[in-house]
Image (cartoon, grey):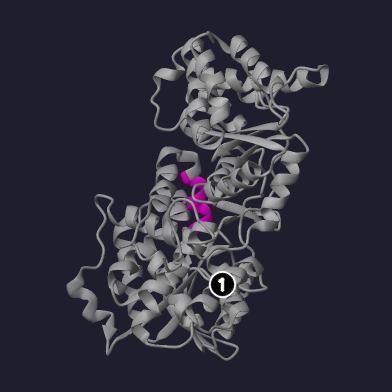
Amino acid sequence: MEKYFNDTGVCIPEEHFMVDISAKISQILALIERGSYFTMNRPRQYGKTTMSFEIFDFLHKNPEYLPIKISFEGIGDSIFEDEQRFSSGFLEIIAKRLKHTNPESVSFFEENAAKTTGLKALSGMISTFIKTQDRKVVLMIDEVDKSSNNQLFLSFIGMLRDSYLLRYEGEPTFHSVILIGVHDVKHLKRKISPESSGKLNSPWNIAIDFKVDMSFSPQEIETMLLDYIKTKNIGMDIPAIAQKIYDYTSGYPYLVSKLCKFVDEDIFPPQNKENWDLEDIEAGFGMLTNGGYTTTLFDSLFKYLEDYPDLYELIFHLVINGKEYEYNLNDPMIDLAVTYGIIKNQNGSCQIHNRIFEQRIYAYFLSRQATRRGQSYPIIEEKEAFIKNNQINLQVVLQKFQAFMREEYGSRDEAFLEREGRLLFLAYLRPIINGEGFTFKEPVVGKERRIDVVLTFGNKRHVIELKRWEGESYHQQGLQQLSDYLDLYKLKEGYLVIYDFRKSKEYKEAWISFQNKKIFAVWI
């Protein structure tokens, strides 16, 4: 079977184009060899399944280890109703899994399942079994998030902790225990018992921090591309392509594979070219950020925002208003956003994890704004006023937006406009450019700043800054910043929307000459 880029389930080196994860596996195996207990907690579709498969396969082939990998997924909730059901059910699950990997051990668990009536008895059965082994027994529990909506699961985790502590007194127990899921135990405890948030370390305080970086670096992405070109006999500038993929994905494993899959299967073949180029990666980025394409990963992303209002506010201000937040995991919402892979640490500040997420979240907020009742935006018939000869007239757009804001929101308070001003402009712009252009927020490399809006329409790019009026001195700084941005794009013309909250403000407009640039500004 011909290899392909896989975006579902386990990745198999013999079947799929894969990043070389051997260095990451070695780090995890070192933890297991040390006898560590830990949680491999990473966001959804972050390579946990593939990584755990590789770890299990290595341990299974090593005569020093007996790995037991189980999951409570798909067995229903009745097993968690009481200790007896859980304890006997746990042994039955182990027996079922060992039938395929270590059939000689199955009879012990099948014979003792019915006799095990509680967690204390379960602990004893585990010790008895491990006494019979001359191998290090490693327990791996996958999908812990789906089995943990109850206190009994935490009691089971507590039992494992107690056995771990007693092993130094001679009690046989698992050599290493690995929990695999999105959450670590402290999040599970908060989820089950919010009032216990002050005791987040229990019952898994013997676990070490899992610090293995499971994202893919540009150099690691190169290993996958090298395998690809050798198999397909296709050329490319591997370092440049790998860096471009990383720039868009920040190494998020699913997004790396999906972006390459789009290029390989949907973008590259019709072009009849011999090599991948950077434009192919940009086209793949466009497919991933297109609102017409969705995945369970994006669905989960938006569900998190819907389920947690405080998380919604945090991400809203990061993406729409460019607000800065210190990267502080003591803040529950920042901690949650990191757990779900929405944000990352960028020089001590919170930043959306990758540009694909940023664009999808950006579009999500715009869609919500556009569907709010009572909003009136430009209709399709009015587009003739804004677009001629396949070029957008942003002077007219800003003039019309100013009139729209004056009519619709002239009486709204400052707090509302401070929060919603940027979103209102973006939502106003969206139906005008729909199908013919797109807006995005692009990182300015080396500047640690972001342009408010880059509009691509036809074959041209336009830079639009949105600022609050805070005096002439700040205004001049804003013009300088916009001028610098225009230089990056080799543009001589830019646009500025100024939100003025003074009581004496005027709804005015002006063409401003600044350095060698022309900047059209409107005051709102």
Please state which amino acid type lies under the numbered disc 1. Answer: Asp
Q: Residue at x 46, y 38 (%)?
A: 308
Compare residues 251 and 476 and report the one nearer the observer: 251
Secondary structure at badge 1 equals: helix
- Residue, far front: 104
Residue at which label 1 appears = 227
Q: Which residue is most to the left?
A: 381
Whether residue 44 is in magenta: the answer is: no
The residue under the point 61% across, 23% down is 157
Which residue is farthest right?
169
Start-end of magenta stretch? 312-319
- x and y percentages locating residue 20 in the rendered image: 62, 62
162 shown above or below 329 = above
Task: From the viewer's perspective, tell me whether residue 479 is left or right of residue 2.
Answer: right
The relative height of residue 83 versus residue 191 in the rendered view (above or below) is above
Disc tally is: 1
Q: Nearer the viewer, residue 42 or 452?
A: 42
Name the quadrant of the N terminus: bottom left
Quick one: 4 or 338, which is closer to the camera?
4
Between 207 and 92, the one lying in front of the other is 92
User: Is 318 colored magenta in this rendering?
Assistant: yes
Q: Main secondary structure of the magenta part?
A: helix
Position above or below: 413 against 7: above
Q: Is residue 356 left or right of residue 479?
A: left
Q: Position of residue 482 (x, y in %)?
A: 56, 77
Quadrant for the C terminus, please: bottom left
